[in-house]
């Protein structure tokens, strides 16, 4: 059993029967049994002359059964390693899912807490309304003067502030707790984007980067009938419908000229409108994605900076689609089903340069804002005495004029007031129809840098909020009494608290 060698006394050798031994070992064996020399393993007769040396650099004897078993065990080891790797991957996926579920549970818990608090606040508010308690817990802060009238108080207070970068316009869906803001932040190289933000979880904002050809969003509206869709008009000659669920553009209309304004139809969810830079208005049916169903020529080539769909009333025929637009020359009413040109609203074309239009569907009131023409002096009967000359280099003395809708073709002037308006910008204004209150008109004072709330129709000042920057957009949500004021770097939300 000694180890064989390739040379020397113990040189590897074999017998005629094929069994292998070392030379010194088999030599001693055969010499000891010279009269009956046999192989130690098979007993076949042999002698020293039958022994043959073998010349091999390396001899290894492998047991086939053992090798098969080894290969089988190795295969099982590989299979177990693969199975273990799969289980580790599944375990990692389960851990991620568990973490996501924990986060979802946390969010739902926070939302439930928020809704419970909101319910308590609403119950407290109703109780305060019934009991006439002027010290209701809803009034936690006082940010400006209040107006007492008709036994009630209208008071807005700051609800929250969101810090932004390069904001332009916005809209809000308070029912679903969603904000949608058009921005051009410096931090991302000046690209245009839409930011979808949850009021419940502001840190989970979603940025939707718009194509470079968008070239600036001019107007933006969340659908009043389908909160998962948003409409925006851009200077890049685009009118687009965005899915807020997926963040993708679902409809994209190519325009011949830049769009300055847009609107959803209040009476038919499939219709949308765009006011263009050349003074015309386009009518779209979203079921037709190729282009507009109508192109309406305006009375002037001035840009249509505001367009509103008028609410269906008894004065309008059933199914009639009517819109109101504003450009520098004044206000126009358009009958979509008619081939006639738009009608100029009387007394809206002689006030100066129209720079803003606010419309309240619930009260059928509009407020148009004007700045003076360079070649005219305003001669308009106002509800307040003339203020002192303006000192701001950006402000000029203009007017706000209130009109009531009388029937399908007529608006009647109901009041007016002096106002400090911008020399160059097109400000945004809103009419707020607050429950159990008179209508409130929110506008921007260019000189004082204030958000001002007026009572309608008197234009009496109710509250004033000092701001750090110019307002770019104002929006109001009647369902929850939320007023939003957007500047370039922030969005401030005010809550209506009245008792």
Image (cartoon, helix red, strand yellow):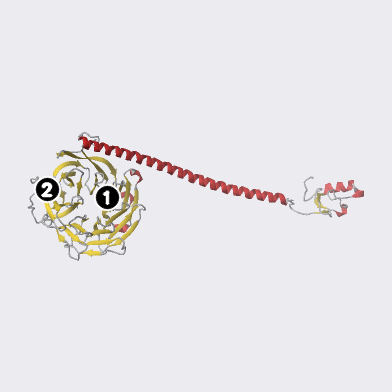
Q: Is residue 142 above or below residue 31?
A: above
x and y percentages locating residue 350 in the rendered image: 10, 56
Q: Position of residue 233 (x, y in %)?
A: 27, 57
Q: Relative to the observer, which residue lies in front, 370 or 100? A: 100
Question: Label 1: which residue?
Answer: 170
Of residues 263 and 39, the one nearer the viewer is: 263
Location of residue 6 with respect to 283 vertically, above or below: above
Other residues around mark 2 within 10 Å, as few (<14) / some (14–19) / many (≥20): many
Percent x, y for residue 404? Answer: 14, 52
Q: Quadrant of residue 263?
A: bottom left
Residue at 45 percent of width and 45 percent of height:
97
Classify the position of the N terminus by image quarter. Answer: top right
Q: Quarter holding the C terminus?
A: top left
- The location of residue 448, given as percent across then percent down, is 16, 43
Mark 1 closeness class: few <14, some 14–19, many ≥20 residues within 10 Å: many
Does residue 270 sit above or below 207 in this rendering?
Answer: below
Residue that badge 2 annotates: 417
Above-or-below relation of 392 to 306: above
Q: Element type at marker 2?
A: strand
Kindly identify which numbered label has been placed on residue 192: none
């Amino acid at each position: 059993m000694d180890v064989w060698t390739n040379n020397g006394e113990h040189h590897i050798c074999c017998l005629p029967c094929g069994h292998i031994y070392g030379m010194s070992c088999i030599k001693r064996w055969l010499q000891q049994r010279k009269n009956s020399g046999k192989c130690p393993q098979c007993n076949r007769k042999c002698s020293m002359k039958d022994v043959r040396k073998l010349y091999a650099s390396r001899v290894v004897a492998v047991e086939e059964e053992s090798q098969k078993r080894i290969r089988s065990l190795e295969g099982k080891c590989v299979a177990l390693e693969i199975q273990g790797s799969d289980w580790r991957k599944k375990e990692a996926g389960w851990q991620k899912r568990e973490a996501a579920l924990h986060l979802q549970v946390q969010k739902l818990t926070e939302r439930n807490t928020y809704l419970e608090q909101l319910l308590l606040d609403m119950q407290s508010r109703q109780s305060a309304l019934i009991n006439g308690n002027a010290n209701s817990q809803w009034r936690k802060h006082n940010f400006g003067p209040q107006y007492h009238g008709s036994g009630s108080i209208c008071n807005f207070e700051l609800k929250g502030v969101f810090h932004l970068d390069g904001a332009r316009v916005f809209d809000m869906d308070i029912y679903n707790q969603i904000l949608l803001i058009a921005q051009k932040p410096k931090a991302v190289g000046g690209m245009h984007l839409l930011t979808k933000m949850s009021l419940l979880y502001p840190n989970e904002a979603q940025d939707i980067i718009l194509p470079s050809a968008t070239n600036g969003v001019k107007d933006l509206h969340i659908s009043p009938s389908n909160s998962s869709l948003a409409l925006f008009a851009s200077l890049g000659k685009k009118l687009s419908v965005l899915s807020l669920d997926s963040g993708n553009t679902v409809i994209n209309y190519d325009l011949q000229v830049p769009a300055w304004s847009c609107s959803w139809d209040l009476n038919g969810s499939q219709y949308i409108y765009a006011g263009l830079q050349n003074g015309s208005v386009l009518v779209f049916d979203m079921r037709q994605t190729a282009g507009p169903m109508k192109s309406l020529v305006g009375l002037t080539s001035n840009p249509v900076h505001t367009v509103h769909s008028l609410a269906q009333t008894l004065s309008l025929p059933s199914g009639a689609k009517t819109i109101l637009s504003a450009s520098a020359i004044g206000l126009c009413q358009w009958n979509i089903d008619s081939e006639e040109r738009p009608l100029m609203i009387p007394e809206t074309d002689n006030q100066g340069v129209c720079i803003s239009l606010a419309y309240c569907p619930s009260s059928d009131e509009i407020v148009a804002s004007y700045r003076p023409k360079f070649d005219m002096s305003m001669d308009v009967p106002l509800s307040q005495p003339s203020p002192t000359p303006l000192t701001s280099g950006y402000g000029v003395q203009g007017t706000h004029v209130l009109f009531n809708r009388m029937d399908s073709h007529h608006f009647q002037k109901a009041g007016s007031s002096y106002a400090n308006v911008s020399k160059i910008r097109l400000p945004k204004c809103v009419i707020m129809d607050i429950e159990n209150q008179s209508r409130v008109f929110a506008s921007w004072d260019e000189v004082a840098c204030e958000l001002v709330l007026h009572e309608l129709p008197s234009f009496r000042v109710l509250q004033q909020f000092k701001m750090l920057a110019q307002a770019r957009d104002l929006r109001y949500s009647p369902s929850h009494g939320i007023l939003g004021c957007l500047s370039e770097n922030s969005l401030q939300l005010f809550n209506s608290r009245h008792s």
